[in-house]
Image: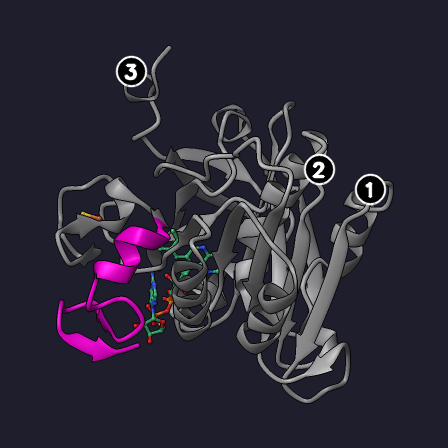
Amino acid sequence: MSTESRPIHKPRIVKIEEKRTETPTITTLMFTDDECSKARSGQFVMVWIPSVDEVPMGLSYASEKGYSGITVRQVGDATKALQNMKVGDQIGVRGPYGNGFKISESTKAFVVAGGSGIATVAPLIEELCKKANEPTIVLGARTSSELLFLDRIKKTTARGKTRILASTDDGSYGSKGLASDLAVTVMQNSKFDMAYTCGPEPMMKKVVEECQKRGVPLQASLERMMKCGIGICGSCVIGKYRVCKDGPIFTGETLHELAEFGTVRRDAAGTKIKV
Ligand SMILES: Cc1cc2nc3c(=O)[nH]c(=O)nc-3n(C[C@H](O)[C@H](O)[C@H](O)COP(=O)(O)OP(=O)(O)OC[C@H]3O[C@@H](n4cnc5c(N)ncnc54)[C@H](O)[C@@H]3O)c2cc1C
Ligand code: FES
């Protein structure tokens, strides 16, 4: 059955079954939903928080049996309400939406993720490892306690030859500095045939430019303000694209041509603001 003919646009009410504190600022909420189990890595859901708002969230977990998760960093009212939810509370979920990552047959994959963006690439890394791809992974965070899913990713990659490198802004784990700088150093010393990235836009911009320079194809997951999530309202536009419908995954070639990428986004009123 095609995604469009399934009833994915109607919010499905699900119960929070488990709440996990991942880092001092990031929390995962687990629930069961059959449609989420069909999601591709990189797709997102619109999450309705009763009496508060509806916001886009990537799926950090989507098991075949429907046990699914969103991993939330608090930035405003909706994310605060999500973090304050308790086991047994209810949310609405519609989707999954968007294009998702295309998993290439490449054997030399490179994954660069920072902050809560690691939530989006964790299922991708699991998929890459299942396909016997052994990616090189760069993870970045402000400080060691904020390095999301480090143990999960180490466990996923334990049997292969995967390289995991990390950077923290304060040097408390891995190398001191930005994940984008570490990624550039890694690229200077290794060849890759596909790169994937998700995280702060300045980080992704640097990775996109480095990949363009070196001719490495890239897929990046973008975040923009979303209201409908299905291509109608236009609140998520970047250039001629709607992030909800044409993305959220865009190629490096497309992003390289987009003047707004890494520079400008829109607030809830549609006003352009600096990234
Ligand atoms: C496809 C997609 C997947 C996402 N996945 C996750 C995820 O896995 N975990 C997570 O914690 N967050 C994720 N986000 C971001 C999340 O949707 C926003 O942080 C959330 O909507 C903010 O709502 P709020 O009411 O808490 O904050 P608000 O008060 O609405 O906003 C707080 C600040 O964040 C900015 N902001 C709000 N929404 C967005 C947005 N959609 N993109 C960029 N900036 C925004 C605002 O301009 C403001 O500066 C994702 C966004 C998209 C588009
Ligand atoms: S969120 Fe409405 S068009 Fe993308």
Residue 5's disc number: 3
**Could you tell me which residue is drawn at 72 percent across and 80 percent down?**
175
Mark 1 residue element: loop
Residue 118 vs residue 56, the one in the foreground: 118
Q: Amino acid at mark 1?
A: Gly
**Could you tell me which residue is drawn at 29 percent across and 58 percent down?**
255
Q: Nearer the viewer, mark 2 or mark 3?
A: 2
Q: Are marks 2 and 1 in contact (CB under 8 Å)?
A: yes
Q: Is residue 131 magenta?
A: no
Tag 3 or tag 2, which sits nearer the N-term?
3
- Which quadrant: the C terminus? bottom left
Badge 2 residue CB within 8 Å of ligand 1: no
The boundaries of the magenta stretch are 251-275
Mark 3 residue element: helix
Picture layout, residue 170 above or below residue 209: below
User: Label 1 crowding class (10 Å Cα cut-off): few <14, some 14-19, many 20+?
Assistant: few
Label 2: which residue? Answer: 129
Measuring from the top left, give residue 34's x and y in whole percent. 53, 24
Label 1: which residue? Answer: 160
Picture layout, residue 225 above or below residue 129: below
Q: Is residue 56 visible?
A: yes
